[in-house]
Amino acid sequence: MLAPIKNILKNHRIILASGSPRRQELVRGLGFNAELLPSTFEENLDPDDFPSPKEFVTATAGGKALEVWNRVRDTKNELEASKPTIVIAADTVVVLDGKIYGKPERPDRAVEMLTELSGNTHEVYTGVVIKHSEGEVRFCETTKVSFGKLSSEQIKAYVDSGEPLDKAGGYGIQGVGGSMIERIDGDYFTVMGLPLYRLCVELCNIFEKRG
């Protein structure tokens, strides 16, 4: 899908404002390299200040993108300054019955999250912000995920594996956590943390508008 702008992208410095190797793997799978530069943005926005999870998660992604954009702008060397920069930032949350689940900070919190998600259908929101020299693009994608009914033993064993602790909602669809999912309705990559189709559409739109 990115073939028409592949050469253009090669002439850009593309930065993924994330510490997630999963997101880096997804971007590199599209056929171009992206630097991994974790944002130092303090993710302390209050969900209650936003009308919906969509606005909340997109605002968090925007904070990440802006922090990295400003840091890169202030520290560019001569070689880097010769290349236009694109910063891509994303953030993901899980929502069940209006309750927002981020990343569990402790194993016991992961157990609580998974117990609540067990046997239910929740939504996964991934907000993305693309910053470039002429502005920025913001969007959010949503996928519904249905968990099977999990026993307390299954939940404990999964949490003990360590996989849940750095993932929104306490699970990873691309890992062992995928075995707990009965079905999904929407984009698989939204659940992974970076909706690839929409990302490609927006990147193409950016360069088509430039002519």
Image (spheres, rainbow, N blue to C red):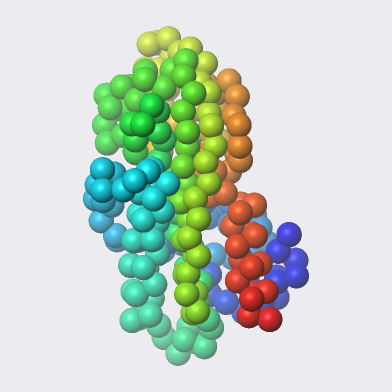
Residue at position x 33%, y 74% in the image:
71
What residue occupies the far front of the structure in this picture?
Answer: 51
Identify the residue at horizontal 57%, vertical 49% (top origin).
195
Placement of 133 over or under 194, stated as above or below: below
**Quadrant position of the N terminus in the picture:** bottom right
Choose between 30 and 197: the one closer to the eye: 197
Residue 101 rendering spot, x and y as whole percentages = 35, 34
Q: Is residue 124 above or below residue 201?
A: above
Q: Quadrant of residue 115?
A: top left
Looking at the picture, how far across and down is residue 136, in whole percent? Answer: 47, 69
Name the residue rendered at 40%, 33% in the picture: 95
Residue 193 location (% of width, % of height):
50, 46
Q: Is residue 187 visible?
A: yes
Compared across the picture, whether 21 is left or right of 31 comes to left
> Which residue is located at x 53 percent, y 29 percent?
145
Whether residue 93 sits left or right of residue 42 in the image: it is: right
Residue 13 higher or lower than 115, as above or below: below
Residue 75's image quarter?
bottom left
Quarter in which the C terminus is drawn: bottom right
Residue 169 in sight here: no
**Position of residue 27 in the picture relative to residue 64 (left or right):** right
* 209 vs 144: above or below: below
Residue 143, percent from left and from top: 54, 37
- What count of labels does the image hold? 0
